[in-house]
Image: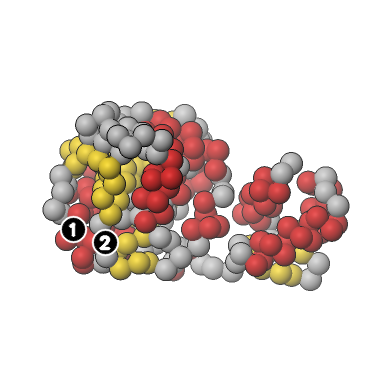
Amino acid sequence: MTQSQRHRSILDFLETHPELVVEDACRQFEASPATIRRDFNELVDQNLAEKTWGGIMKISQVVNYGMLPISYRQILHMEEKKIIAEKASSFIQDGDVIFIDGGTTTFQMASFIADKRIRIITNSIIIAYQIDREKRDKQGAEVFVTGGILYPESGLLVGPQTNLNIRQYNAKWAFLSAGALHIDGPSNSNQLVVESEQAMMEQNHQFVVVAIDSKFGHRNMSRLCAWEKIHDLITNKTENDAQYQKLVSNYISI
């Protein structure tokens, strides 16, 4: 197991356990105490975990009141997000104009669309940069960044100027993230983020929500919309499939 794989596994473990101590981590990840302590220190230094007596615990931030740092969210459930992103990207054809909302699942779309001859409008400077990095052909994707206020620790541009700029464009697709999925509809933790997503929804023909299964059954503060407004929902296989299939026009579970 590489160091980055170990880090992801440690953070995944902390999602469902209150604490991880060195001794248990050595057994679970088949690594020496010195290696595990080094891993713990690096995760703490990156603000991805907090130190405890003899171990680490999940960072004590409340999701309902604000986003967790992008560096933390990006490495959780990465393989599932890649599968969802690949499916979402298959909808896009050369010549399309698309919106991409900032998020860790939409971020994974970058490698699948960078070389498509399309135009991308995004409020995520992280996604814009990643698409530019992934592009192998100068004839690939053309990226437009919305401008606006940088929301802390997210790489997202939000606010009135963002929404005004979004409304200057028309697109065929909008690919949106969600912090939570409930029977009442998708939601996110920040009102400014939701307002930008709603602006994207107004300016395109079809929009797609991409989200991993851990988002189901939860509510965040700001509701995005009712389910009947969603054209496509792409997720990984979940026990919630039967319940949510009835709510969305095109429910894709992979």
Q: On the picture, is 14 further left or further right than 29?
A: left
Give the labeled residue for mark 1.
165
Q: Which residue is mark 2?
A: 147
Q: Quadrant of the N terminus?
A: top right
Between 138 and 44, which is closer to the camera in this rendering?
A: 138
- Asked whether 133 or 122 is in front, the reply is 133
* Quarter occupied by residue 165: bottom left
* 33 lies left or right of 212: right
State the residue in front, 47 or 208.
47
Mark 2: few/some/many CA within 10 Å (<14, 14-19, 20+): many
Residue 221, compared with residue 94, is above or below; it is below
Which residue is depicted at the point 84% across and 58% down?
34
> Residue 3 placed where, x, y %?
71, 49
Quarter location, residue 41? bottom right
* Residue 236 image point, x, y percent: 48, 35
Residue at image position (36%, 64%) is 190
Distance from disc 2 to disc 1, alpha carbons, whole Å, reads 7 Å
